[in-house]
Structure formats: structure tokens, C-alpha cells
Amino acid sequence: MGCCVPIYWFRLNKENPTILYNGTVTLLKTPKKLMGVTALHVLKRYEKDCQEQKVRLQLLNEAYDDLLERVIAVSNRLDIATFDFDEKLLKKMGKEIIPLTSWPPQPPEEGRGIMLAGYPGFDRLEPKKLKANFGLFTAIGIARVVTNEQITWAIDREYFAHIPKVRELPPNQDLGGISGGPLISWFETPNYVSYYKLSGIISEANATLENVVAKRADYINDDGTIDKKYMS
């Protein structure tokens, strides 16, 4: 819950500055670099909107208008973009944010436990101009299908944990906005010690099929570059 933040941008209209789009950024601290990772389609949408109108980009509650200058690498094939981050911005956000540090990423085993998170647009509130509050979507489940490039999680309502006072996810809920969020997997050593690692970056949430697709994060290098065979 502490390793991701919402990314969103306003159309700068004096009378009605509205949010055009929102996604999620996962924060990583490797042995070499502090970086942000998001879905490439989120970055492309921001770049397109910048070309068409004047906008203001924010991460959580902090302006971040030099994002495009900070990009390290992108992969169309994996729908992943990495960019440089810094400790000063973490402190300015005024929230305890803990980047993922267990390196390198590791794909899950099919049928084993995973966690995922992101900031869907349906849970967004705009209390006043240029201000927004987001609700964090989180889920615990199992990896349904793991391939060379992606991981799929399906919403299995048969096994929902019914918790009093906690709102359940409505059927076919649009989770648009969680793209760029982390998919984290649980592992176990031969001595039965549990540990977790980043496994993927969320790329797609299909409301009709009720599943989420994440692209594997183990192709991200510790300097923010991406494995050459996935750069196309």
C-alpha cells in the first residue's frame, strides 16, 4: 500500500480545471537507482494531452511537470515506462511512501499468492480546484496464468472474504486507473520463510471479463533500462 502513488493531470481551465486522466506509479529502489514505473499507455496519454492543451501533472499532491524529461526507458511490447525519481519528492509528498527494495523482481508461480494495488478513477474525489483524493484499490488472490510476458489475475467471487463494514467490489466494476500499479508475489524458502517480491506492473483491467493483466517486471534492469529484446 505504501509503494505506489496516483498519477493524474488537470486541464488548466481557470473556471473549471478538470482531471483528464489518472493512473498509478509504482516506486522502486534498486541497488543503483530510485525510480518510478508506470504503464506506457499512461505516459503516452499524458504526452498526447500535453501536445493538445495546457495541463498540470501531479503525483499524489505534488506537481511533477518534468516527467517526460525524466524518462529512462519504455517498452511498447511490455507496456512499461520507467523514469528517474528523487528522495526530495518523496519527502514533499507528505506521506510515508516506501519504495519496493527487494531486488530483482521475480515472476510468480501459477496458483500461488499475489497482491496488487492501484488508484481507480471511480474512487476519485475532487473536493476543490486542483485538488484530488483517491481511494486505493487492493486485492489478494492467486496468479491465474503466467507467461513469458504477463501475469493474469481473475476476480473469483466464490472465494471473497466477506468483512463487515468493508465495501465489496461491485460486479463488472471499471478499475481504469490502476494501470501502472504493482503486482507483488509471495514466495517461500526451503525453510518455510515467507518473503515477497515485485512481479509485475499492471497493464490492463477488463471490467467485462473481471480480470487484471500485469506485464512481468523482471525485464526491468536495476538502472531503469529494460531488457533489449523487449524494447520494441
Image (cartoon, helix red, strand yellow):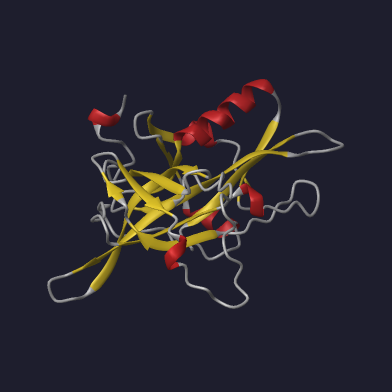
Image position of 50 with respect to 25: above or below = above
Q: Residue furthest top?
A: 52
Q: Position of residue 72 (x, y in %)?
A: 39, 35
Which image quadrant: the C terminus? top left
Q: Residue at the spot x=12%, y=71% of the render?
A: 190
Residue 61 visible (yes or no): no
Q: Position of residue 46 (x, y in %)?
A: 58, 32
The answer to whether residue 88 is left or right of residue 74 is right
Image position of 165 with respect to 148: above or below = below
Q: Residue at the spot x=40%, y=34% of the render?
A: 79
Name the one closer to the observer, 175 or 71.
Answer: 175
Q: Residue furthest front?
A: 158
Q: Position of residue 152 (x, y in %)?
A: 35, 48
Q: Residue at the spot x=58%, y=65% of the render?
A: 168
Image position of 223 with respect to 101: above or below = above
Quarter location, residue 197: bottom left
Q: Residue at the spot x=65%, y=50% of the render?
A: 122
Q: Number of labelled discs?
A: 0
Q: Position of residue 45 (x, y in %)?
A: 56, 30
Quarter location, residue 141: bottom left
Name the one closer to the observer, 133 or 214.
Answer: 214
